[in-house]
Amino acid sequence: MRKEERYKGVLDWFEKNVPVAETELHYDNPYQLLIAVILSAQCTDKRVNMITPALFRDFPTPEVMAESTPDVIYEYIRSVSYPNNKSKHLVGMAKMLMSDFGGIVPSDIELLQKLPGVGRKTANVIASVVYNKPAMAVDTHVFRVANRIGLTNNSKTPLETEKELVKHIPESKIPIAHHWLILHGRYTCIARKPKCEDCGLKPWCKYFLTVKI
Ligand code: SF4
């Protein structure tokens, strides 16, 4: 199957069957989403959503967070993975937002990556979810699902996957395609045993057509 045909089939299927796909993290503004995404590294969205209400209540702005300390923040986030590093990142991020960005979360991917705790994936999530930019954040689900379906050719790195997906997916669909692939990886094309029998992508899926049969 030609790559164009595969992309078209997969995107059309998602568009028809998953018209709404959004992040499962709870947030009300860009600052809150940035906190939630930093906390979600190596951790489930469900766990993050359990602890952010108290954090957002007591540290409602970057200004307030910047005046806190990692030790104080640690107590709020101790149940997520890597709470030591993440509490340092959150305070550092808030301080830099105040000192360099006027308290506003930037939209530029390079600028976002200057913030403590913000790598390329997190920067792409913020750019795409908050600012609707055509940025593809590649997490473990996007990486695996893209390779399995054959949207990428056994890509070796998240950056390779990002470049390949951005090359083939129309700009306007990149933000939602990120969520399509994450949700598909989380609930259907799961890591250990993909639920191919329940999956509507079978007609275009390289793994299903070549490996599984
Ligand atoms: S057919 Fe199977 S391997 Fe392919 S996308 Fe669906 S669940 Fe994943």
Image (cartoon, rainbow, N blue to C red):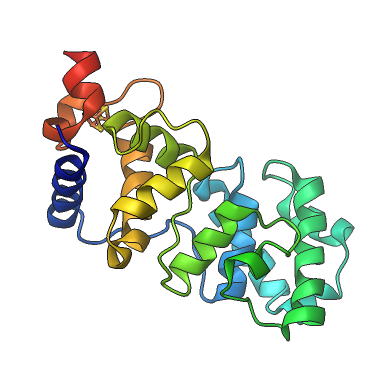
Question: Who's the residue at 86% across and 70% down the image?
Answer: 68
Residue, x 76% and y 71% (percent of image)?
94
Q: 105 or 2: nearer the eye?
A: 2
* Image x and y of residue 31, in percent: 62, 73
Q: Quadrant of ligand 1?
A: top left
Front residue of this view, candidates 9 and 22: 9
Residue at screen point 34% across, 20% down: 193
Quadrant into which the N terminus falls = top left
Residue 127: percent from left, percent from top: 51, 68
Q: Quadrant of residue 62?
A: bottom right
Q: Position of residue 153 (x, y in %)?
A: 36, 31
Q: Position of residue 167 (x, y in %)?
A: 35, 53
Name the side, left or right, on which 210 lies relative to 194: left
* Image height of 212 relative to 137, above or below: above
Question: Does residue 50 appear in the picture of this structure?
Answer: no
As displayed, is residue 183 above or below residue 197?
below
Left or right: where does residue 183 sit relative to residue 117? left
